Amino acid sequence: MKVALYARVSTYDQQTLPMQLEAMREFAEKRNWIIESEIEEIASGAKNNRPKRAEIIKLARQRKIDAIIVWRLDRWGRSTLDLAQSLEELQTLGVDFVSITEALDFTTPAGKAMAQLLSVFAEYERNLISERIKAGMAQAKAKGKKVGRPATAQAKADKVKRLFFDEKIKNKSEIARRLKIDVRNVRRILKKS
């Protein structure tokens, strides 16, 4: 089995990287797994930008690895939802996941059951978020507030027409650039004219 090791530290506790990697190497060696890739990332767990983790997920999508090993779950996931969604994607791809500190091993029957439970919780959390958003929108509508994205392009309809008809700027991309709106909106506005 080909595996990738993922070690992450925040900028505050960088001294644990060697320890994480050593523990993961030992785990892989005991199982006679081939370490295809070792990836180290120094980034806060709260930040959304984790390019090194994205590299491992890319390897999984390309089917270059069969499993990912991490030292602890909090090294992999930013939040419960992020963790559940990323593990659900790995499960869909047929890529196993092992967190050695929590003894979470998706290569075992108990680990596979845990992966399915995590998927259920991720779906439940997504549904709760959706319900809260819909309830908030309904409440805003009831109070007479406009719901949805602001109609920034439509608010500039008069300017679009003035530039096109009065100032004779026929290049729709130029109009869009000047008004900082999408060219599709310029076309839509002019089509209605």
Image: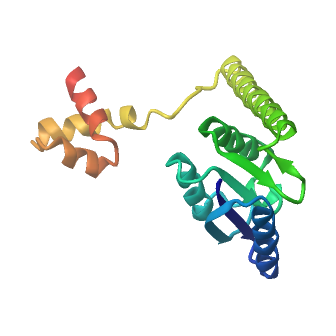
Residue at the spot x=58%, y=26% of the render?
146
Indicate whether 59 appears above or below 181: below
Residue at the spot x=74%, y=23% of the render?
131
Q: Spot the residue most to the bottom.
A: 15
Residue at the spot x=66%, y=71% of the render?
40
Indicate whether 82 appears above or below 125: below
Q: 181 left or right of 105?
A: left
Residue 161 locus on image (x, y percent)? 21, 34
Q: 85 left or right of 57?
A: right
Between 27 and 159, which is closer to the camera in this rendering?
Answer: 27
Between 126 and 96, which is closer to the camera in this rendering?
Answer: 96
The image quarter containing residue 9 is: bottom right
Between 26 and 153, which is closer to the camera in this rendering?
Answer: 26
Regarding residue 117, the answer to whether it shows in the image is yes
The image quarter containing residue 147 is: top right
Indicate whether 23 appears above or below 73: below
Q: 175 left or right of 138?
A: left
Residue 118 locus on image (x, y percent)? 80, 36
Residue 12 locus on image (x, y percent)? 80, 78
Between 185 and 111, which is closer to the camera in this rendering?
Answer: 111
The image quarter containing residue 119 is: top right
